[in-house]
Structure formats: C-alpha cells, structure tokens
Amino acid sequence: PILYEGRTAEGAVSDGRELDQLFEDLFSDKSGDELEAIKRKYATKGAILEAPKLIEAKARDMLRHYVEHILPNGLKAQVVSYSRRAAVRYQAAFEVARDELVQEAVDLDEATRRLDDLALQTKPRKLAAAVRAWRSLDALRSLEFAAIISPDNNDPAEWREWSEAGKIESRIACFVKPLPSDDEEGGDPLAFLIVKSMLLTGFDAPIEGVMYLDRPIREAELLQAIARVNRTKGGKTAGILVDYYGVARHLKDALSAYSAEDIEGALQSLKDEIPKLRDRHARVIGIFQSRDVDPIQDKEAAVYLLEDERLRAEFKVKLKQFLATLDLVLPRAEALPFVKDAETLGDIYDRARRLYREGLPPLSKAIGRKVQRLIDEHLISLGVDPKIPPIAITDAKFADHVSRKVSDRAKASEMEHAARSHIRKKLDEDPVHYQALSDRLDEILKQFGQDWEQLALALSEFVEVVRAGRKKDDDLGLDPELHAPFYDLLKQEREKQAPVRGPDAKWLADLAVDLVERVVRPTVNVVGFWSNAPRREELRGQVFMFLDENEIVEFDRADAVADRLMELARANDRKLTK
C-alpha cells in the first residue's frame, strides 16, 4: 500500500504560520521596504516554490523525516519539485541540510544520544531528529543527492551536470542499488533523486520508500507517480507519500476516472494505520489472553503455551503483522505506547524459536528494520544474541546450557525439544535408528508426564544416548555412518517375512555392504547425478534387481523397498560421494 502523509510549507518551517509570516521569518534581517520588494519578486506561486530560502527549509524538513522514518529501513527517496530550477536548488540544499544534521548529531552530549524514542516524545523535533541521526551517523554522512532534469539549450552551464543523458543513466543505476551496509554488497550512497517530471512513469525502483511531493500533480500522472513508491521489496512494508503541496485536494478528481479495482488500496492516510496498529496488537495479545495467559507479565507461561505447533504458526503470522504496522508508524508518538509490548513479544518469539527449533524462523527485516533493531537491542540487553542459532544437542556446551535453566520443567523442555530437533534432522539419513529414538522419547514423556524432576533425570540419560550416536557393531563390523543405515532398512523390511538372527544377520550385513559399495556408490559418485532423471531411474532398476536376485524381500514388495533405498541414498549423498 501507499501511505499518505500531508505536510505544508508553513509546517515544514514554522509550525503552521501563514506565508506572509513565513516570509517575515525567512527574511527577518530585511527592512520593511526590502521585505515588500521581496514579496513582489515572489508574487507568483511558482516563484514562491522556487525561493531558495523556502527550498532550504523544506530540504531540512524532508531530510529529518527521511532520517527518522525511512533511512532505518535502508530505503531511498524521490523528490518531485515544482520546476527544473527548483530541482537543482533542492540538490544543493540537501547537501547543506545533511552537513548541518551531521553536526547537530555530533554536538549532542552522551546522555542525550542515549535517549530512546519514548523519551524523545517530549523533546523538540529538531533535537529528536538529531538523536535519531546519531543512530545512523555513518549512513547519514555518506548520503548523496542528485537532480534528474531534462536538458534545454538555454540552461545555465552548471545544470548540465544534472541533465546529460550519460550521467542520468549512471545515477539511476546507482539509485536502484541498496544503501551501503554490512548486510548487502554492492551498495551505493545515492539516496535522493530530485525530479520535476522525469522518472514519474516507467521507473522501477523497489528501493524507493518515500516520495516527497512539492508541486501540483493530477490524474494519470498522480497515479503513475504514487506507483513509483509502491514497488515491493524485502523489508519494505509500504511506500510513503509525503505531500508538501496539498496534492490530496486533487486526489478525488484523479481517482474518479478509474474503477474501484484499479485504485483499491492505492492511497490511504498514515493516520489510518493507528487503529490498525491497536487492532493487530490486540489480536496477538489475544492469542494468550484467550487461554488465560498474560504474555506481558508471564513470558515463561507464554512460551510453554506455544508448544502447540498450530498456535506457534498463528503467533508468527499475527506478531509479524503487528510489528510491520508498528514499523510503519514509528517513531511517531502514537506508536510509542506499543514499543515495550513489541519488545516483550519479540523476546517470547525468540525464546520459543530457540526452545522448539521448528516453525519459527528468525524475525527478519521483512517486519521493518526499525522494529527489528528495537527487538535485537532488547534481546542483547537480556544477554541474548539474536544472530546466534539455538544451541544443538551435539554442542559440547549443551549440558552447561541446560544446567543454567532455573526449573526442572525448563530443563526437561530444553532437552526434549533439542532431542526432537536433532532426530528430525537425522531421520532421513538413518530412518530406522532415529525412529527408534523418537519412539523412546515418546515413551519417556508418557511415563513421567508432569513429574518434572524425574522427567529431567530420564531425559538427561536419553540425551547422552542421542549425543553418542551410533556405535560400531563388533559382530557385524558395519560402518555405523555409511553401511549400518542401509542394513537396518533391509533388516526392517526382511523381518516382515522372516526373522533376522545369527547367520542371517551376517548374510544380510554383507549384502548391505555390497549394495552400497558395488551398486550405489559407483553410480551416484558423478556430478549432478540426482538432477539427472534417466540416471536415477537406471540406479533404481539396479537396486530392484539386487533385491530380487538376492531374494532379500518378496517380489511384490521390491518396488517399494527400492524406493526407500533410493531416498536413503539421496539423504546420504555427502557420505557416499566422499
């Protein structure tokens, strides 16, 4: 969607004063006669909109808005100016505004730099913008701005910098790249394109997160313009249109020529996001409250509630919707009461992700980078690094990790879900062995129920068995990683028709080694084997013939067993091709 935010020239400079008062402020050092002469010079609206002082003031306002709302998400901006002259003046004004804002941020004392958004709510906007600029100081310092204008034979020579076709093409190529960051390579600091009419149609730049409108624009051109900022991109929850001219007055006329389907969701006020934010907050909290859990007051109970996989899926969807809307509204005052709950819910999500290890991927920039930064900083303050994955059961520090859990229930839950995660990951590589472990885990859980102390003791012993992995069978002499999984599968299928003991076990073990070493391994040890359907089918036929010729299973089951063996071979491709 496109979110609309209306501002005024007066608001950008002097908080709602009329243009006459605005002139008096901008030219306060002039005498009465000089002021009247200036007013006559700028008698037309066009002249007013090209006035250097006014452009400088609006450039400062736009840059503050950009630094507070758009830059944290790594997106870029486009300015639609009144004229080509205004575009060139904006370019210079933005460079001055950038340097001023950098200096304001550098001049802040240490205590002020540490103020959070809630504290900034009561501070002057200029100070709040400087604090937020400090948070992105390196990015702000490097920002670049370019005018993109059509050429004219009567243009001043210095305008050619912005109108030559080669330079325009080069700057567009720079603009569509991401901003420089640690996360993405090949970035470019060109963050603002300033235009009059160019690039309003047919220009595809998903990186564009905001358009600042400072000229009259109507009907088809208006819809084309707002479409520029509506291109989707990862981490971009909506495009924002900031109107300095009052274009919304013409919006009804512009949209009336189109069908409801054409314009549905094309433009909505940013103010409409506030009730949506409240609603989405209530929905995610309601997941827990409807089950008599207060997630804000009892995070541990909320995490245990999410053991239900379907509930985790619902929580993931509703939390992301809430956080994405919060990111749109931040750092506006209306969003700030929701920040603490967002941090707490983010903590619950991260705890559940680490405990259950399934169904909850890490929160990504898709929720918006402003909110992602808030949650990451909150987790780090709690001693959790959100970039480090959950500790695996095979990690040497796993036992220490479990011992630091406060309650027996927490210890048991950590061991249960770490074991389940490990079993799931290994099941395809060794299905018989790991299915047996899965069944044993279920038996332990059923046996001890909610006797957390005894359950924790039993799971501690079980975890050691899982960690130890397969041991070499001295009687059969099978490689526990390579041959034993194939033997176990053949044994499981063979026992459906006859027991496998003593000499039969040795006979079957030798066949398992033959199958792996003489049939499977030489065939799969070819680059791209698993993407080559004819070769796969050829191997499957060889496996079928091996089963039939050695009478390992009954003929009418050989097809199904061959399929299982092919799946097992594919899961063990890395070991087979060493």
Image (cartoon, rainbow, N blue to C red):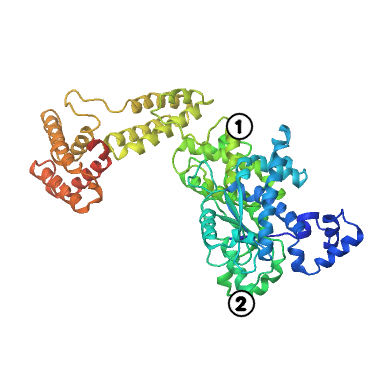
| Residue situated furthest right in the rendering | 32
- Give x and y (percent) for residue 330: 66, 48
Q: Which mark is residue 257?
A: 2
Choose top left, top right, bottom left or bottom right for residue 338: top right
Foreground residue among 20 and 420: 20
Compared with residue 130, is residue 176 higher up or lower down, i.e. above or below?
A: below
Q: Determine whether the residue tagged by mark 2 lies in a helix, strand or loop.
A: loop
Q: Determine whether the residue tagged by mark 1 lies in a helix, strand or loop.
A: helix
Residue 293 appears in the figure: no
- Give x and y (percent) for residue 562: 18, 46
Left or right, residue 534 beside residue 460 = left
Left or right, residue 105 beside residue 430 = right
- Give x and y (percent) for residue 492: 21, 38
Foreground residue among 479 and 228: 228
- According to the image, label 1 marks what residue? 381
Amino acid residing under circle 1: Ser
Amino acid residing under circle 2: Ala
Which numbered disc flags the more N-terminal residue, 1 or 2?
A: 2
